[in-house]
Amino acid sequence: MNVLVIGMGYVGTTLSLVLAKSGHQVTGLDLDLQKVSALNQGNIYFHEPGLQELLDELTSTDRLSFTTDVQKSIHDNDVVFICVGTPSNEDGSANLQYIKSAATMIGENINDYKVVIIKSTVPVGTNETFESWIQEANTTEFKVDVVSNPEFLREGNALYDSLNPDRVVIGSSSERATAIVKQLYYDVDCPILVTSRKGAELIKYTANAFLALKISFINEIAKLCDTIGVNIQDISNGIGTDHRIGSHFLNASLGYGGSCFPKDVSALLSTAAKYNVPLNIMKEVVAVNQIQPKYLLSQIKQQLGNLTNKKMALLGLSFKPHTDDIRESPALRMIDLLAKEQAIIHVHDPVVKLSSNKINQFNTPEEAAENADAIVICTEWPQYKQLPWGEIKRKMNIPYIFDGRNMLDSKQLKQIGFRYRGIGYS
Ligand code: UDX
């Protein structure tokens, strides 16, 4: 099939590559010439495992190209995916400006029947509105069917999740369009759930809200664990083995971040408020998440006292490992909190380069930790497990580790002589 993907962020780029790998003829459209040029030159311009190798493999096939040409790309393709961003407005609602301009572009350039598939996370009812925006700009008799097909990709695992989805959700009111979308996914081995468009939109928000809820829930229990001296990992294992609960998303941490959970939970709350349905649990999920970095700071202060001019080595800046994305990263909250305490902040991250006058960034964790009064782990980059901890300890001023991701082997570190504290885990 000939497919156009609009929006070359990590979702749109991954989708373009995966559809081309499946044999479809794919055009990736973005108005940002820099992104398009990078991709046309064969470079993935962001950090996402496996994509560069897949792009290298696909360059010899002629099944994939990237463009800024709106008219030609819409004329040449009858299936159009929308993967543009839906950032938060100041009041927490989703900002639909990019969605609206995609609808106008399609309406103005329509030259045949099109199936438009919205992958972007959009509030309930947006698929319907999107169709009316297209029709407002459409001066021809050609028809469009708009289908909701939310993505469930984790950053850092986007390629794996695309090739091994748990489910494909199709929200559609047209049998013709549903059949076309099913053909696109001919090679995936998972349940395909067909529902209404509003149903599909709400599934996406509810999935992210539920995962955020699991994290805030375990983070609250972790505080109880800290107080009564129980290890939170034992609790996570003990409840996670119950299939009704499931073991995922029960890692206590200094909070969730990223481009999805914070934004999508706010947007769900905003939708619920619009319909006058209070989602009290989700309000608490947000509140708990906002407290987490402050909670870690209080643990640090409890051990180290006043932090003025204390040297803190903060390891990890991205909101999770295997990505260079720092949107809503708890590490940035931690930097702000430590800066307010007038600590000296040394940071390391394997891929993120942060420009900020609050920090000094080092090329290695060892350098960042030299003469430090404490190490604060903010992102669970796997390489931090393998560091020469004995050597690092010898060069530190005070050998404290505050593990905001509960990722390190506390027993081993204590044997070396570190003083270790995790979240609900000491
Ligand atoms: C999420 C959803 O998982 C994905 O399905 C959706 O399409 C987009 O949003 P992503 O934001 O990439 O994906 O990351 P995810 O792996 O879900 O982690 C989100 C945040 O929660 C990260 O900051 C992570 O560190 C944190 N987290 C995750 C925890 O603190 N504890 C956990 O147990 C799991």
Image (cartoon, grey):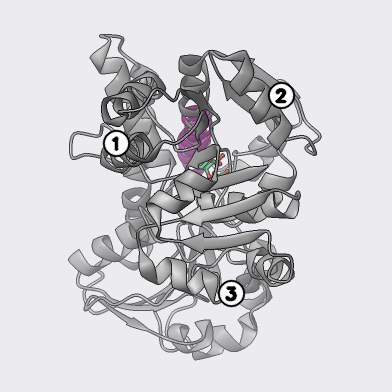
Describe residue 162's horizontal placement relative to residue 122 as left or right: right
The quarter of the displayed image where residue 124 is located:
top left
Is any atom of residue 157 visible in this view?
no
Residue type, label 1: Lys
Q: Position of residue 346 (x, y in %)?
A: 36, 80
Alpha carbon separation for disc pair 3 and 2: 33 Å
Q: Is residue 32 left or right of residue 273?
A: right
Q: Looking at mark 2, is its residue's CB closer than 8 Å to ligand 1?
A: no
Q: Quadrant of the C terminus?
A: bottom right
Q: Residue 159 appears in which quarter of the rendering?
A: bottom right
Q: Dots 1 and 2: beta carbons under 8 Å?
A: no
Residue shown at the point (73%, 54%) measured from the top left? 21
* Residue 54: percent from left, percent from top: 70, 65
Q: Could you tell me the amino acid type at mark 2?
A: Ile
Q: Is residue 365 magenta?
A: no
Helix, strand or loop at mark 1? helix
Residue 284 picture location, percent across and down: 35, 27
From the image, state whether disc 1 or disc 2 is nearer to you: 1
Question: Is 213 included in the stretch rendered in magenta?
Answer: yes
**Marking on residue 192:** 2
- Please report the bounds of the magenta region as a residue range: 209-226
Where does label 1 land, which residue? 100
Q: Can you say whether 162 is above or below 37 in the image? A: above
Badge 1 or badge 3: first in the primary sequence: 3
